[in-house]
């Protein structure tokens, strides 16, 4: 009998440090991923304004991004919203609940600190945008921003 058949030892790498590093990388990327990017409908042709500048995000509580296509349909995460009023009302309820967790003195029906960002196609009729803004105001939203691109971004 040969000695090699008695002691059949193989060198196997220790996988624990590699798996630990992989899980740390997964955790890191989960923490830094930007889910807000999914709110933007990139198919919209935004209005071009010479004075368009980036939004000032200092002191912002939250954002509600509303995409309105050329036909005036509201889109959320790529899907057309059938009932605009109930969608905005449910977003307002969720935002109110989120604020109440942090601030017990906040009262339901109070003005929401969230900024509504309207991303409307440049050919959307103003009447349709006005209805959406009016619905938002009825739910307690008071801060609005219209998203546009400047000449350099458009060309």
Image (cartoon, grey):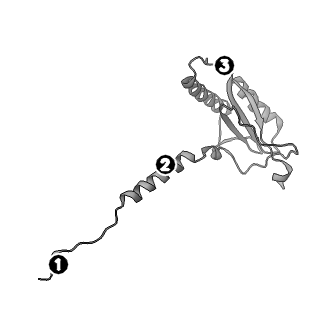
Location of the C terminus by quadrant is bottom right
SS for dot 3: loop
- Residue 110's disc is 3
> Where is mark 2, residue-wise?
27
Towards the viewer: 85 or 66: 66
> Where is mark 1, residue-wise?
5
SS for dot 1: helix
- Label 2, label 1: how far apart the Cα atoms are: 45 Å
- Which marked residue is nearer to the observer: mark 3 or mark 2? 2
List the single residue furthest toward the bottom.
Answer: 2
Q: Residue at position x 65%, y 43% from top?
A: 39
Instruction: Look at the picture and state if 23 lies above or below 57.
Output: below
- Label 3, label 2: how far apart the Cα atoms are: 37 Å
Counting residues from the start of the chain, the first of labels 2 and 1 encountered is 1
- Label 1, label 3: how far apart the Cα atoms are: 80 Å
Give the quadrant of residue 113.
Answer: top right
Residue 106 can be seen, yes or no: yes
Residue 27 % position (x, y): 48, 48
Q: Residue at position x 71%, y 32% from top?
A: 115
Counting residues from the start of the chain, the first of labels 3 and 2 encountered is 2
Location of the N terminus by quadrant is bottom left
Instruction: Look at the picture and state if 119 lies above or below 60.
Output: below
Q: Badge 1, how many Cα within 10 Å: few under 14, some, many 20+?
A: few
SS for dot 2: helix
Residue 78 can be seen, yes or no: no
Towards the viewer: 118 or 101: 101
Towards the viewer: 5 or 79: 5
């Amino acid at each position: 009998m040969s000695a090699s058949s008695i002691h059949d030892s193989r060198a196997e790498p220790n996988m624990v440090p590699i798996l630990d590093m992989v899980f740390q990388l997964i955790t890191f990327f989960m923490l830094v991923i930007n889910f807000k990017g999914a709110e933007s409908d990139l198919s919209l042709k935004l209005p071009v304004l010479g004075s368009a500048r980036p939004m000032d995000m200092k002191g912002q509580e939250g954002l509600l991004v509303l995409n309105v296509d050329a036909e005036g349909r509201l889109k959320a995460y790529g899907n057309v919203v059938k009932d605009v009023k109930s969608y905005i009302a449910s977003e307002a309820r969720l935002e109110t609940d989120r604020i109440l967790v942090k601030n017990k003195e906040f009262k339901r029906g109070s003005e929401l600190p969230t900024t509504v960002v309207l991303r409307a196609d440049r050919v959307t009729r103003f009447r349709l945008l006005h209805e959406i803004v009016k619905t938002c105001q009825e739910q307690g939203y008071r801060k609005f921003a219209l998203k546009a691109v400047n000449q350099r971004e458009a060309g």
